[in-house]
Image (tube, rainbow, N blue to C red):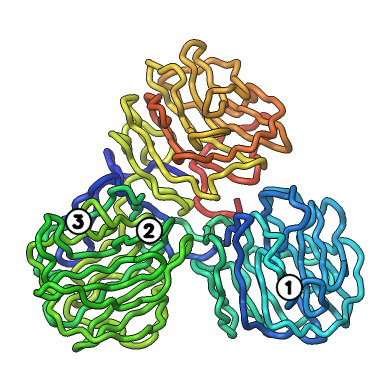
Amino acid sequence: MLLHGDGTNGAQNNTFLDSSGNSLSLTRNGNATQGSFSPYGSNWSNFFDGTSYLSLATATALGTGNVTVELWFYPTDISATYQNLYEGRSAAATNTGLGVFQYGQTIEIYGNGLKVSSAASAFTVNTWTHFAVVRTSGTCQIYINGVASGSSASYSDNFTSTTRRIGTNAANANAYTGYISNLREVTSALYSGTFTPSTTPLTAVSGTTLLTCQSNRFIDNSSNAYAITISGTPSVQRFNPFGTATAYSTAVIGGSGYFDGTGDYVSTPSTSNLTFGSGAFTIEAWVYANALGSFAGIFSQWPDNGATANNSYTLESVGSIMYFYWVDSSPALYGPANLGSIETGVWTHFAICRSGSTLYPFKNGVLGTTTSITQTLNSPSSNVNIGGAVAGSGMWNGYISNLRVLKGTALYTSNFTPPTAPVIAITNTSLLTDFTNAGIFDNAMMNDLETVGNAQISTSVYKYGTGSMYFDGTGDYLFTRTTPDLVLGTGDFTVEFWINLAANLVSFAKIIQMGTTGDAFTIETQSTTNVLTVTNFTSTVYIASSTALTNNTWIHVAATRASGTLRLFQDGTSVASAANTVNFTNSGNGIYIGSSSLGTAMNGYIDDLRITKGYARYTANFTPPTAAFPNTGPV
């Protein structure tokens, strides 16, 4: 997470805009919010929770020739005996391919028994590591971060397997816990000695048979374009080994609306711009579900006042399928048009188009089964809802990005490539919600934040840039849901920010609280001694500063953990340290900035808040940053 707090004075995340030429009035309901997490941009990974995996029923048999399999992995748990990263064998204990296992801090390659092993302690938990195994003329060698690790060994068998597993083994056991990014399988020996791993996402070089774990969805980017099956709940994440390649830009990255499934939606009064009659139309959007229920609306014109749903329509998920329903004037429910399956934790592009009397349903640009439609779609008494089918029910739990509605145009009637950049208002665009009006947004592009109370941008008091985030001490805070990226776990980390506190401190006022149960990570003030402490949710103190805070002054605060030592710094000077191996699970209701789930709010300003996972930026006294944190870079 990276929050600069720059922007327009008083800006929050609560005002939603229609970017079509109609500029329809949009009303926020519940605590719907918006931010910078979107389907666009490069540098992705997949997170596996220890029960989930990906599989390919059809893949390339690698034969007896040279082979390279490489990937980046970030293990969050190395306690399990074996965890499988990549499975190229058709069955366990066979020599039909390569089985790549994490065993503690060692990587081992298996066929029918151990074939080759890396050196002991080849990598560490909660750290990105590049791994490659290369078979050259029947001999296998492992490379860790570009350096040969362990001894080479013979493995010259014919790799006949045409199946693959990622995150588990051939028997769907020994599941992996952590991230995998940019997995590439190539039918040549790419490396023959020490090399520098790529600092950018891998490409499909000559001989590439599989290239995955690098997109906003589960897809094979090799020329084979093999189908990938999802098992369990793996998820697509921006957290990756390369850092941030592009500074956040609404034109390049766009944004998303976030709806928590408990009453959040955005609505506009009924308008002729969104009553399609019997004419052509297009509804399209990228969606990312956190959870799926009995039904949840993406875009609906459906009565929310108990009226008969004559001539209404809705695009909604029902269980694990996305459907388009409509009603005639009888009324009788028609359809549905089936747009395809929907999974959690992945960006998916859906589109429904009508041309003539035919509905064309698409998932990720692939045309499904067309459906006949003769009804007019004209429900003048109905509000139009985004993120809810009917007010108070059918609420969407997740993100919606780039929702665009065209009246009079069927934009797609055959297979197409889903948008790779934010869509714009084209001819006949009736509604375009790009969700880019957030005042406080994450420059790391991983989180959408809710501005609660009067939490807002202040351009009168700031350290760097053009503004800071202001909290008045009476219920203001920022909130975002807990994601795998915001779980600090047992590894190294850095949480840092500039703070300017008002004169009246609240006892145990929370500056940041990551989680609401168990071992949450918290930085808070204690007014009785006017110092900072690092605690858990129940205020068990891990370390406490011995240096009093000065009010109405900008102070740089950093909490780091490196190799089991927790440190607290003020203005670059170490003010406390202690041994600490706590597993900060950050579980519970989410992440709070400027207050806590218990309402203990701070009064003051925060500027340039940055959370770094897997890396302790400071382990000794340092000079505080002399400029705003950069928006791009490897860490």
Percent x, y for residue 322? 35, 70
Q: Residues within 10 Å of mark 2 (few under 14, many from 20)?
A: some
Residue 233 in view of the camera: yes
Q: Which amino acid is tagged 2?
A: Gly
Secondary structure of the residue carrying tag 1 is strand
Separation of residues labelled 3 and 2 (CA atoms): 21 Å
Marking on residue 267: 3
What residue is shown with label 2?
A: 293
Q: Residues within 10 Å of mark 3 (few under 14, many from 20)?
A: many
Give the answer, above or below, for where 93 lies relative to 506.
below
Are the residues flagged by discs 1 and 3 in contact, CB closer than 8 Å? Answer: no
Q: Residue at x 55, y 79 (%)?
A: 227
What residue is shown with label 1?
A: 69
Indicate which disc, 3 or 2, sits on the residue closer to the N terminus: 3
Separation of residues labelled 1 and 3 (CA atoms): 49 Å
Decide if residue 319 is on the left or right side of residue 118: left
Q: Which amino acid is tagged 3?
A: Ser
Secondary structure of the residue carrying tag 3 is strand
Separation of residues labelled 2 and 1 (CA atoms): 38 Å
Decide if residue 491 is on the left or right side of residue 363: right
Indicate which disc, 2 or 1, sits on the residue closer to the N terminus: 1
Residue 23 in view of the camera: no
Q: Mark 3 against mark 2, which lies toward the viewer? A: 2
Residue 239, picture quadrant: bottom right
Percent x, y for residue 271? 10, 65
Q: Which amino acid is tagged 1?
A: Val
Percent x, y for residue 623? 61, 32
